[in-house]
Structure formats: structure tokens, C-alpha cells
Image (spheres, coloured by chain):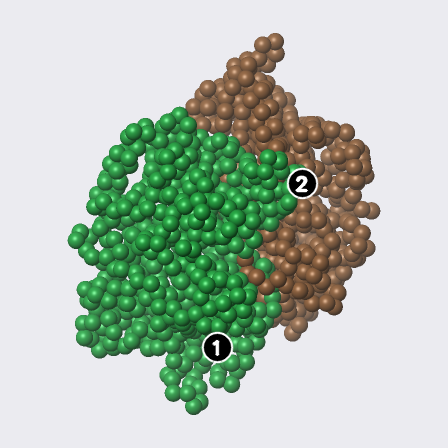
Chain colours: A green, B brown
Amino acid sequence: MTLLETTNPAAAGGRGEPWISFDTDPGRYRHWKLAIDGPVATLALDTAEDGGLHPGYALKLNSYDLGVDIELHDAVQRLRFEHPEVRAVILTSAKDGVFCAGANIKMLAQASHPLKVNFCKLTNETRLAIEEASASSGQVYLAAVNGAASGGGYEIALATEHILLVDDGSSAVSLPEVPLLGVLPGTGGLTRLTDKRKVRPDRADFVSTVAEGVRGQRALDWGLVDELAPRTRLAEASRARADELAARSDRPSGATGVQLPPLERELGTDRIAYPNLTIELDRSLGVATFTVRGPEAGGPGEADGGAAEAPTPGDPEAVRALGAGWWPLAVARELDDAILLLRFNEPEIGTWVLRSQGDPEAVAAVDRVLLAHAEDWLVREVTLYLGRTLKRLELSSRSLIALVEPGSCFAGSLSELVLAADRSFMLDGEVEGVDRPPAALRLDGMNLGPLPCSNGLTRLQRRFLGHPEALEAAAARRDEPLRAEEAEALGLVTFVYDEIDFEDEVRLAIEERTSLSPDALTGMESNLRCGGPETMETKIFGRLTAWQNWVFQRPNAAGEDGALRRFGSGQRPRFDRKRV
Amino acid sequence: MTLLETTNPAAAGGRGEPWISFDTDPGRYRHWKLAIDGPVATLALDTAEDGGLHPGYALKLNSYDLGVDIELHDAVQRLRFEHPEVRAVILTSAKDGVFCAGANIKMLAQASHPLKVNFCKLTNETRLAIEEASASSGQVYLAAVNGAASGGGYEIALATEHILLVDDGSSAVSLPEVPLLGVLPGTGGLTRLTDKRKVRPDRADFVSTVAEGVRGQRALDWGLVDELAPRTRLAEASRARADELAARSDRPSGATGVQLPPLERELGTDRIAYPNLTIELDRSLGVATFTVRGPEAGGPGEADGGAAEAPTPGDPEAVRALGAGWWPLAVARELDDAILLLRFNEPEIGTWVLRSQGDPEAVAAVDRVLLAHAEDWLVREVTLYLGRTLKRLELSSRSLIALVEPGSCFAGSLSELVLAADRSFMLDGEVEGVDRPPAALRLDGMNLGPLPCSNGLTRLQRRFLGHPEALEAAAARRDEPLRAEEAEALGLVTFVYDEIDFEDEVRLAIEERTSLSPDALTGMESNLRCGGPETMETKIFGRLTAWQNWVFQRPNAAGEDGALRRFGSGQRPRFDRKRV
């Protein structure tokens, strides 16, 4: 088995290359062993050496590549949805004496710059999803480090809330990227040392430059780990700590999980179609147009039999019965999958246009369920997942343009797509000969808290940074359909055009966008999307990732004589010693 | 005249290249015209086209290069020290119809990567010094934009507190870097749009992608400028606004400024010597050793005639009489100059070792003056300058290692060097046969607020992030000499060794450091030095600069067919369209 899907070759830009897909499930894992024992799950890394996603390297010593990370990403997701009973997850290794050697170096050395960057980004997102599960899902992760944890291996442990390290006189946690590879511990390592674990900066400096790392008492004293255990007691100590953490969880007893079946997805030549989302690809222009379909009116959001406009929320039991078919969950899964597919497989499509189609009132009805039952474990998971998906969208290095048109259903949670866009265009009035209601935008409670950006602000707060009066004015109009003029006056859309100009203006804007330097746009968007406060999350994606990407480009790392390429060759790297 | 000094060619690594120096004064400016009229100074840009620092480009349309920026850096500094009477500064242009075209593009296209990065860094530091003068020195900057302000030209205006734009139907503010050059508005432009001026992100996105920029009413409505004036009224309106801002200043009346004479500096083959600072260069190892000499005991800090240990502060009049000769100002100037010289001229010297020599009590006495007269305009300027110098040190892409040894005088403000270092080593006990007091470290009030890092925290707060008890314990011991064991127990130094091991351990640490990838170290230090909160300043140097540096490396900008290289050639750039 491989994670490469050969699907429709025409869909890979006519290049006939197989696509990287993110479809997997525990029955197909090659690298992780998932075991569940009451409230505690154990997720043990046991890489198949010959199971690399690409040829040319062996996944020795529990080193990982994208394929390993895709499985982890899947496992973290399924544990949240399919296992309400799991309240603590022990991350460990099934190999003796080694926890995880981090990202496979041969893989990194041979990977293209875009693949390296995309790989690190997904890895970072998964690490953050682990932290979110601990913080917000009542599913706390801990790491039982039963052997050497190097680089990305230690970085996985850093994403948990409690690190137990075996105290055997040899097992160390280490960040050998700088001394051995000439790159950074770039999947959160540096930021988590200083900002999460509050390791003294001079000690963090030492740790990050010493290939052999730190073990035992010093690792504990310096705050690099939380607990030591002799080899014979590690399993027991981990379980005891897991039970203790599980006891504090607010996950329900006796609930049934929601299974996440394979996605229905059709890959056509220029088209990816899911039940609730269609993506049209224009490869010559470099544009993908996402069209999200809203929920059926009177659907599950209206399971209480209320009229379409009734604010009464639906019944969470009805939601549970729908499971993965419930519209917001289905749409989050489809969007999430599409974002990842396009990120990895369609790098030349640099502009994503966001549209919607449906009944805004039906979206608003779903939002009422999300808001009324925010405490319900499943509803909470769905909201958190919508939040992660929106963040993933904004972290994609693609220009985002939203179109609010007659017949669109940008209400509440779905209107976050408009607020996430770099620019939005709204059509003023009806379109002659088209039987659709005039474009309207609609805010509700989902825009006012439950779906924060990476920097912790809502998208409205970020939009109106330093203008509380504008924020208030917009929030005051929630639950009302806002026509183009009003939406513009409230500052919710960038430009408004009438029927005569809309199409031309949008076409022009998109064509202009696609003509700009892809790199400059990536850098620009990474800055403009992150106004205001920074969080550990934004620091990881902004500061840390940007520096890592820079280092990844430098001959001292990636050149013929660079450290990354020469590692393991017996030859020392040759450095241009100039400091930049 | 050129800003290149030919000095001692051996000092330029034996390469015989002339050094870039930062020595200038208003009498030698080629690009700026400084005029002072009562409380208002006018600093008008009027670049000499043939006055470029390097051959190969003409400084047309008030475009700038490093030489122009060195003069601005000098002017901003002198206005603060030499002109206590100046309470507002109008930045404008002496050329008709053009304010400033930003960084010279031919210069950028031909510059090496290190030069581009160093140039942008100094530019950013000067912009921040302008903002600091406005915020903390009672010397408020405003911009009278009398014509097109493009790219770096608009970015200078963004560094002021009030932007007046001529409303002539054509003059625009613009950030054409992305659409024309394939790089970023990287000297603060993106960050200042979102975080300082709180421009709505979608509007910021529009502004940053439209080469022609935004003019008139829209520029005002969108918050890109603060005021419009017809051409005939611009000077008058600027002066009126300057007078209004000047009236709010707390700078003194009738005070005499402190002249900043040329620095005494000897450049030897492997040595730079100032009266209070000597730097030894080991080019084969790539190490510069800074030795700061403390003030004379009983010097100006003790002008009140108190004993060396007396806490009574000196008299600010005595300070004023000493002027630029006062130790903390002299030391700040020398350190600042040395940092810039080494940054630009000795890129292969990647490790800076920080030592001191003198009487810690004499440093503490100076600190008492700084603390007791913090409200005095000159004392305030000296403290702010010390703060900027320490920030400049930390923003230098060099590893910093501090040595606290017998005879060193790391007390208070000077001990900030130890806290700024990536790692510090302290010698425990006396050294046989050497007649110097055992090493001691000493904190005082200067470590508890007046010298913040770029992120707004004191270095002690940054060091003890998340450990308030450790911060409190260290602060409680202020004004006491702390021997090695105590300093280590308080967490103030990284490692402590006795006489037998010290030299070897330090040598080993330095040798290890110099063997690592310079790029990886730069990236690592940029992350580890910035734990905790972020400010606009850290965002500019972290997020924005890191992305800019990445973009600067990309073929889409800097390659043969890249936008930066092809600009003005009549040929369109060719882009690799892959998004990373």
C-alpha cells in the first residue's frame, strides 16, 4: 500500500503524476499502532522502514515522512470524533530504545523546496491539532518517551501536555537540526521551548546546538520534560499520569462516536466534486473556484420541526444520528480534504476563489444548533473542526478571493470564508434573467467567538483591529441579511459592483492577481493575514516557519556541499561563513 | 565625498576592500537638508543622483541607498541629542512632485543577499528610532508628502505619527514592491499598515498589489494618510500641525544640546579601539571579542562628591558639562558604531564575545544617575540610546557569548550585555596570580524597566518568562554583587566554571559555535531571542523580515529572469508559478 493515489492522471495538471492523497484509516496504517483501553488510547509509532511515501529512503529509527504524518493526522482526527470515551492519549514508540528520530533526513535532502515547506506545514498543523485536543476536546495528550527523541521526534513530544522521559542514563531529548543538518527545529521546537515550556533562553540555546541533547535529571531540571521514570516503570507511570489527566476530562460517558467514512469524491480532469463542494480548476489561469453548497432547508438543523426561519435549535440527538452526514461536519471534511489536495498537488494554482450556493437561512439554522449545543461533545468537535479548517485555509499559501453573489448562502459560519479572504466582491442587486435572490451576507453568533483565527481574534476582530466601533456596528446587525450596500457600509466586503460591472471587475482582479510573483504574494499574505496579537501558533507559522523556509533555501543547508545534503556521507559540510 | 572609508585595508579581512563607515554629520550630508526653525525641524530629502554609495546606479526621484539611510540615521540621532529645542520634525522632500521613490531598484538588483538584508535592517532600525523619538523623546515626526511616495518612500512616511498628503489629483502613496518587483514592502510597510495604522486587511491587500497606489480622498478614508492639503497649502498645513504637536512636547526650554563629535577610533589589522571599548578580531576562528571598559571611579557619576559606594546620584549639570564624554553616552556610541561596522564589514565573524573590565561600583554609580534623573531630557536620551544599542546588538545576526570574569564590571546597565547574550559563562572564585577581584554580577534598577527588549519585556522578564518567582528572587538581590554560585543559583548566567575549567570550557563552546551553519544560527537566534509577546517591532524584524529574506533568495525575485532583475528592462519577469 502507498499513500499515492493514481486516480485520474489528467487531474494532476496533465502531468500524469499520481496525487498525494490524505485518505487513510487505522486499518491501513503502516506506521502507527492505535490501541484503546478504556479512557486511555495509546498511539505507538512503529515505522515500516520500507513504507516511505517516495522511493529513496528508509524510515529507520522511527524517522518520519509525509506518509507517517498523514496517518498521525488521521489518527488525531478519528480519536476526537470516533472515540468520545478516550480522554487521554499516550504517544509513544513501539520500537525498543528509540522514541522517534524526527523527519527522515534523506527524504528532506531529496525533497523539493515546495514539498519540504508543505510537509512542515502539515506537520505543524497536526501538532497544533494535538494541542487543541488537549486544551479544548477533553482529550489530553502525553508522551511516553521510551528512547531517543531527536528533532521532530522531540517536537512531537513537545506538542503534548506532559512528557515522561525514560531515565536510563542514555535516552535524551535533542534538537540536532542546527548542529547536524544546518536547518532549524522548524516544526515548533524553538517556539515551544521558549513560549510553551518557558525554558530559559540560554538553556534553549544550548539544547538547540548540542547534537547529543539532554537526558535525565538535567532534562527535568531545565523543563525539557515533566517526569522521569526508569525503563521498567515507564509504561506504568505513563498510564498513571494518563488516568489522572483523563479524570479531569469533560468528555461524556457512554456516548457513541461518529464514524468518519471515506469521503465521496470524484476527481475529474478539471474538477473535484464532493457532495457539498465542487472545485473547478482553471490551470491555464492558475485559479481554483470552490463552490460550497449550503445545507438543505428543513434539514437536521431543523429537526425540531421549526420553520426555516425559526431560531429554535435542532436536537443534538438528531445531529448524532446524522453523524458524518451532518452538513457542517461534512462540509468541513470536504473543504479540509480539498485544501490539502490542492496544496500538495496543484502548486501552480495560486488563486482560490470562494463561492457558495444555497439558502442562507438553512446555514443560519445549522449555526443555531452549533451555538445552542456548544457544550455537547460532538457539536463542540464539529465547531473546533470548522475552526481548524478555516485556519488551514488561511495558512495555505494561496490568494483567497470571495464572491458574494445572488443565490449565495454566506451566513454565519460560512461567511467566515468571506472574512478569511484577502479580498471580497459583492454583487449589488439582482441579475437580470437569473431567478436567484439578491446577494446577502449575514453574521451570527458563530462570527463572534467560536471560530478564532490563529492569533486568537475572531475574523471580525482582526478585520476591525483598532476600530471597536466598526466591530460593534457589524455585530449589532447579526442575524439580518445584509445587502451589498449595507455590507459595504459596515466594512464587511472589499468592493461592491452592480450587475454591469461585477463580472469584469472580478475577472480583472483575478487576472491581475495571477500575474504577480507567487513568492511575493505568499510573503505578503503571511503578513497581512496576521495583523494584531501573536500567539504561539502564529509565531510558529510566521516567525519560525519563515526563517526555516529561508534556511531551507540557503546553500549552507540545501546546496551540494550543504549540511542537509552531506549528512551521513562522511563528508563535513562546507559553509559560506558570511552571516546574513 | 563617499561614505566608504579607505582606512586600514588590512582591517577589512586583508581583502583590501574599503569599509563602509557610519561617520557623517550635517555638514557632509549629500542627500538631506536639515533646517531648524524654533521648535520645528525640517528634514528634506534631496538625493544627489551621482551620490550613490556604490557605482552602478543613479539616485533618481529621491530613491535611496544605504548612504542616504546612513545620513538619515545620523540626522535622527543628532536631532535628539544636539537639539533639545526641536519638538517636531517634518520629513519632506526638496524635489518638486516627488516625495521619495523608495529604495533604489538597480541598487537592490545588484546588491548581494547579505548587503540587502543588512541594508533593510538598518533602515528598519532607523524607522523605529524615528517612532521612538516621537513616542519617548518629545520629538514628534510628521511627513509632508509633497509628491509620489512609493515603496520605501511611503514606508518612511509610515514611520511618522502624522502623514499629510498633497491632494493634487495625482500624488499617491503606494507599495509597488509586490506588483513591480516581486519582493515585499519589507521595511515595515505591511506591518505598519495592519498594526500601526489599523488599515482593514483587505484594503491593505489591495494597496499592496496595486502599483499605482492610492491618492486623495480614498487614501484618507482608508487610513493610509491622516490629512490632505492642496499643493499651495501643504507647507502651511504641515507647519501648523507640527506646531500643534510640538506644543504637547515635554522637551525643555532653553536647554543646550550635547554635540556629538567624531568618534575616536583606531582601526588596526585585527583590532578596533575606542576610548571605552576595544574589539579584537580573530578572523581565522571568526570571533570578535568586545571588551568594554567601565567608567572611572569617582567620575561624573560621583560628581556630588559622594564615596564610590554612596547611592546619592550625581548632578545632571555635571552630566551636561561632560556631554558626549559622559561614560554611558560614550560607551553607547562606541558600541553602536562597532556593531554597525562589524555587521557590514566583517560578515564572516559570526561570534561576538562580550567582556568588561573595570569597577562595578562605578557602573552602579552611573546607573544611579540614570535612574534618579530619568526625567531629565538628556539623561532620558542616554537611557533610550543605551536601549537602542542593546536592541541593535540582539538584532545583529551574530552569536553572543558573555564572559563574566575577575575584574569585569557587569553591573546594572552593563550587565544587560550578559542578559542579551545567547549564553554566558562565569568564573567562580579568584584566579591564582591575578590581582583582580573575583567575578561578580550585579543587578540594579536599570535591569528592571528602562532598557526593554524589542518585545517590550525587560531582559530579566524575557529570561524568566513564566517563572515570576525566579524574576522576583533575582530582583530582590539587586544592588548586591553576586558571586558565581549565587548568580548561577538565581539563573542569571548559563554556566559557571572554576579557574581550572573556565578557559577550556569557554574555548570549546566558542569553537563549537563557530563550526555551525551561519544561516541556521541566524534563524535559531531570531527565534530564541524573541520568546514571549510580540510587538510591532518584533513583527517587523521577525515575521516581515524573515519572509522578505526568503523572497530575496527566490529566483522569482533575484534570479536572472526575476522581477527585481528585470525591472526597467522592458522585459516582463518569468515566474516559476509554484506556490510554496
* Quarter of the figure that contains the C terminus of chain B: bottom right
Residue at x 53% of width, y 30% of height: B423
Q: Is residue A492 above or below residue B329?
A: below
Residue B385 image point, x, y percent: 60, 39
Q: Which residue is mark 2?
A: A576
Dot 1 alpha-carbon crowd within 10 angstroms: few under 14, some 14 to 19, many 20 or more: some
Q: Nearer the viewer, residue B186 or B375?
A: B186
The answer to which quarter of the image holds residue B189 is: bottom right
Say how many tags the image has.
2
Q: Residue furthest top?
A: B433
The chain carrying label 2 is A
Give the alpha-carbon distance from disc 2 to disc 1, as whole Å: 52 Å
The answer to which quarter of the image holds residue A318 is: bottom left
Residue A399 image point, x, y percent: 51, 65
Amino acid marked by disc 1: Val
Describe residue B233's horizontal placement relative to residue A158 as left or right: right
Q: Which residue is mark 1?
A: A496
Q: Residue furthest left?
A: A254
Q: Nearer the viewer, residue A317 or A496?
A: A317
Q: Residue furthest bottom?
A: A433
Q: Is residue A180 visible?
A: yes
Dot 2 falls on a residue whose secondary structure is: loop
Q: Is residue B273 above or below residue B85?
A: above
Describe residue A40's horizontal placement relative to residue A431 as left or right: left
Mark 1 or mark 2, which is nearer the start of the sequence?
A: 1
The chain carrying label 1 is A
Residue B230 image point, x, y percent: 65, 70
Residue at x 57% of width, y 72% of height: A284
Q: Nearer the viewer, residue A45 or A171?
A: A45
Dot 1 falls on a residue whose secondary structure is: strand
Q: Nearer the viewer, mark 2 or mark 1?
A: 2
